[in-house]
Amino acid sequence: MTKRHLVIATRESPLALCQAESIKTALIKLHPQLSIDLLGITTQGDKRLDVPLTDIGGKGLFIKELEEALMDGRADIAVHSMKDVTMELPEGLCIPVISEREDARDAFVSNEFASIMQLPAGASVGTSSLRRQTQLRALRPDIDLQNLRGNINTRLKRLDEKDFTAIILASAGLRRMHLTSRIRSHLSVEQVLPAAGQGALGIECRTDDQAVIDLIMPLNDAITHASVTAERAVCRRLEGGCKAPIAAYAQVHHGELTLHALVASHNGQRILRAVRRGHSDQAETMGARVAEELLQQGAEKILKEFL
């Protein structure tokens, strides 16, 4: 039976709505007969902006209510930033589609300085990500890193009000919100390795809803799917959500997947790195092997700092 109507569950932040709208537009282009509604949901992660995510349960707080809407039938699909998705999905749900990735790098945003290396000693830099904080401490141990949460516009407003000298945001979000003019420079993946899944959108649905899976599958990008699968396999084996500074980033060229991953200590003084190359159809296995390499280097001891 061909579906005629689809409900997309989405967070109600401006970026999440923008991302859901982009998926809606792509689906209607594929299936002109389809009508689509958005079901906006304010998640616990959006409500609790006064404390770091690590203190209230991690990134899963951004998707739990969306998954509940899928399971109780209020929604057919949910659109997520893949870096917010927990490593284990609830029983009965799957993410068959990961669409083509936007720029995965982090962006340096400042009204006064052009790059992270131009900041003066003691400059205040806002980011809530432990992954970013630990790598930035290694790169610039002389700057003052401060927690910064909220949606993109809220964070930019705080920068404009001079609460910070600079802030670090995901390039993908700024690009999707047509705010590329705010990007002064990009942090290279050598400077700050991205989060697993950063820049990629996933579409989650019920495992047994074949009609919906058939509708959305044309949006899957095989290269992005393989890359994100490898990155998430690293995190899954290390059992690290956003409570630990784990970074993983994969790229595919001519069928060969190159996966970089790291685990960093809280002060950034110890960073363990691993890299592996192989065929993209071995993405899951490669991710697990890279994680094993990090564990052999002593990653478990570092990760215990964050439990």
Image (cartoon, rainbow, N blue to C red):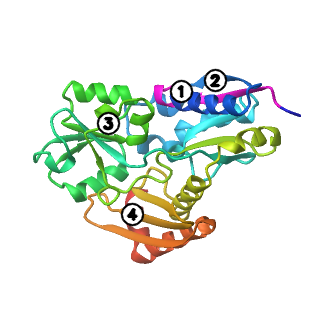
> Is mark 4 in CB contact (under 8 Å) with mark 2?
no
Asked if residue 306 is positioned above or below residue 282 in the image, the reply reads above
- Find residue 38 and name its label: 2
Q: Residue at x 48, y 54 (%)?
A: 196
- Find residue 144 and name its label: none
Task: Of the two numbered discs 3 and 1 on the same chain, state the one appearing first in sequence.
Answer: 1
Residue density around tag 3, few if under 14, some if 14–19, many if 20 or more, within 10 Å: many
Q: CA distance from mark 4 to mark 1?
A: 32 Å
> Is mark 3 in CB contact (under 8 Å) with mark 1?
no
Task: Of the two numbered discs 4 and 2 on the same chain, state the one appearing first in sequence.
Answer: 2
Residue density around tag 2, few if under 14, some if 14–19, many if 20 or more, within 10 Å: some
Q: CA distance from mark 4 to mark 3?
A: 22 Å
> Is mark 1 in CB contact (under 8 Å) with mark 2?
yes
Q: Residue at x 17, y 51 (%)?
A: 117
Number of the front mark, 4 or 1: 1
Label 1 sits on residue: 17
Number of the front mark, 2 or 3: 2
Label 3 sits on residue: 148
Which amino acid type corresponds to the residue marked 3 in the rendered image? Leu
Asked if residue 7 is positioned above or below residue 116 in the image, the reply reads above
At mark 1, the secondary structure is: helix
Q: CA distance from mark 3 to mark 1?
A: 21 Å
At mark 3, the secondary structure is: loop
Q: Which residues are magenta?
A: 3-16
Q: Is residue 255 magenta?
A: no
Task: Of the two numbered discs 4 and 1 on the same chain, state the one appearing first in sequence.
Answer: 1
- Find residue 263 and name its label: 4
Q: At which x and y percent is residue 157?
A: 29, 24
Q: At which x and y percent is residue 4?
A: 80, 26
